[in-house]
Image: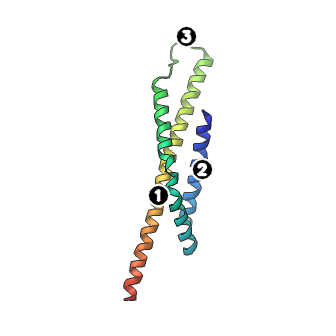
Amino acid sequence: MALQWIILTYVVAAEAAIALLLTVPAPKLLKKRFVSLISFILQPCLFVVPFASFQLLDLYWKNEHRLMCTSEICTAAERDRYERSIYKAQGNVILCVAACFLYWSIYRICKFYNEIQSLEEVEKRYKDE
């Protein structure tokens, strides 16, 4: 079951790198080509959102059906195992939310850049007239 979290970690790292590259100042031609490439890749990469949402639902279900270890019958090892599983689940929730947020951020950055490009073209046409 750890493979899904490794995959999601790599996806979040790639999304963070792409978001960073999209926000770094670059020459206009290079920026235009990079944004068009990322815009082309965004649609197939939409699988991240349902995948992360499914993982969130899985974490919620596991949290609701987790055995509680709060009584005095539990040993120290059982209590530590319970606390570790809670911490791991919290980290995984942050990972899922980060994946969805970064995908949305990349989508909005590309959309804003494309809108700015179209507005600049309209402005250029008005100046030419």
Mark 2 crowdedness (10 Å alpha carbons): few <14, some 14-19, many ≥20: some
Residue 114 in the image, given as x and y percentages of width and height: 45, 68
The label number, if any, that marks residue 13 in the structure image: 2
Residue 64 in the image, given as x and y percentages of width and height: 45, 25
- The mark closer to the camera, 1 or 2, is 1
- What colouring does the structure picture have? rainbow
Q: Where 128 sits versus 114, above or below?
A: below
Which residue occupies the extreme top position in the image?
73
Q: Which amino acid, mark 3? A: Ile
Q: Quadrant of residue 2?
A: top right
Count how many numbered circles sit on residues in the image.
3
**Callout 3 touching callout 2 (CB < 8 Å):** no
Per the image, the residue denoted by label 1 is: 107
- Say which element carries label 2: helix
Which residue occupies the extreme front position in the image?
44
Q: Quadrant of the C terminus?
A: bottom left
- Say which element carries label 1: helix
Residue at 42 percent across and 82 percent down: it is: 124
Residue at 56 percent across and 53 percent down: it is: 15
**Callout 1 touching callout 2 (CB < 8 Å):** no
Q: Which amino acid, mark 2? A: Ala
Q: Where 125 sits versus 24, above or below?
A: below
How far apart marks 1 and 3 lie (CA) works out to 51 Å
**Does residue 71 appear to the left or right of 124 in the view shown?**
right
The label number, if any, that marks residue 73 in the structure image: 3
**Does residue 39 appear to the left or right of 129 in the view shown?**
right
Mark 3 crowdedness (10 Å alpha carbons): few <14, some 14-19, many ≥20: few
Q: Of 120 and 1, which appears nearest the observer?
A: 1
